[in-house]
Image: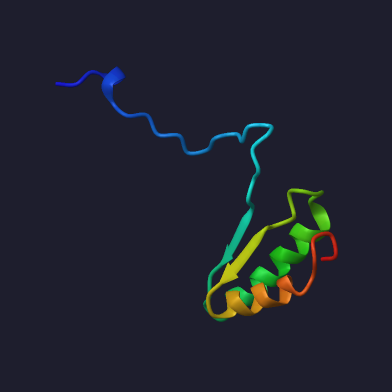
């Protein structure tokens, strides 16, 4: 029977190294009324968090999430 030390260790989050680039991704789901919730959450994210926490390099979505993604992508970083 394998001991605890031989099991593979899984890291759920790893702090990026100081000199490595970070790519921030925002992915939004679809589903009718979720769109209004997403829009409110995006408003809070962009008006509450300081850079770079509220800035994303890639924004994607499905269904209503795609509509919110397109609306968000109209603005450049810092112009939200």
* Colour style of the rendered protein structure: rainbow
The extreme left residue here reads 1
Residue 27 lies, with reference to residue 15, above or below; the image says below
Residue sitting at x 63%, y 51% = 23
Residue 50 lies, with reference to residue 19, above or below; the image says below
The extreme right residue here reads 79
Residue 33 seen in this snapshot: no
Occupied quadrant, residue 67: bottom right
Q: How many marks?
A: 0
Q: 41 and 15: which one is in front?
A: 15
Residue 61 seen in this snapshot: yes
Give the image location of residue 2, x and y in percent: 19, 21
In the figure, is residue 30 to the left or right of 67?
left
Residue 11 lies, with reference to residue 76, above or below; the image says above
Residue sitting at x 30%, y 18% = 5
Give the image location of residue 29, x and y in percent: 53, 70
Give the image location of residue 26, x and y in percent: 61, 60
In the figure, is residue 49 to the left or right of 2?
right
In the figure, is residue 71 to the left or right of 65?
right
Quadrant holding the C terminus: bottom right
Q: 24 and 63: which one is in front?
A: 24
Give the image location of residue 22, x and y in percent: 64, 45
Occupied quadrant, residue 65: bottom right
Residue sitting at x 14%, y 21% = 1
Residue sitting at x 70%, y 71% = 39
Q: 16 and 37: which one is in front?
A: 16
């Amino acid at each position: 029977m394998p001991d605890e030390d031989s099991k593979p260790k899984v890291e759920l989050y790893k702090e990026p190294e100081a000199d490595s680039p970070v790519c921030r991704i925002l992915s939004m789901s679809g589903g009718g009324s979720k769109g209004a919730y997403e829009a409110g959450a995006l408003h809070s994210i962009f008006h509450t968090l300081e850079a770079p926490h509220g800035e994303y390099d890639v924004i994607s979505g499905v269904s209503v999430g795609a509509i919110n993604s397109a609306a968000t992508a109209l603005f450049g970083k810092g112009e939200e």
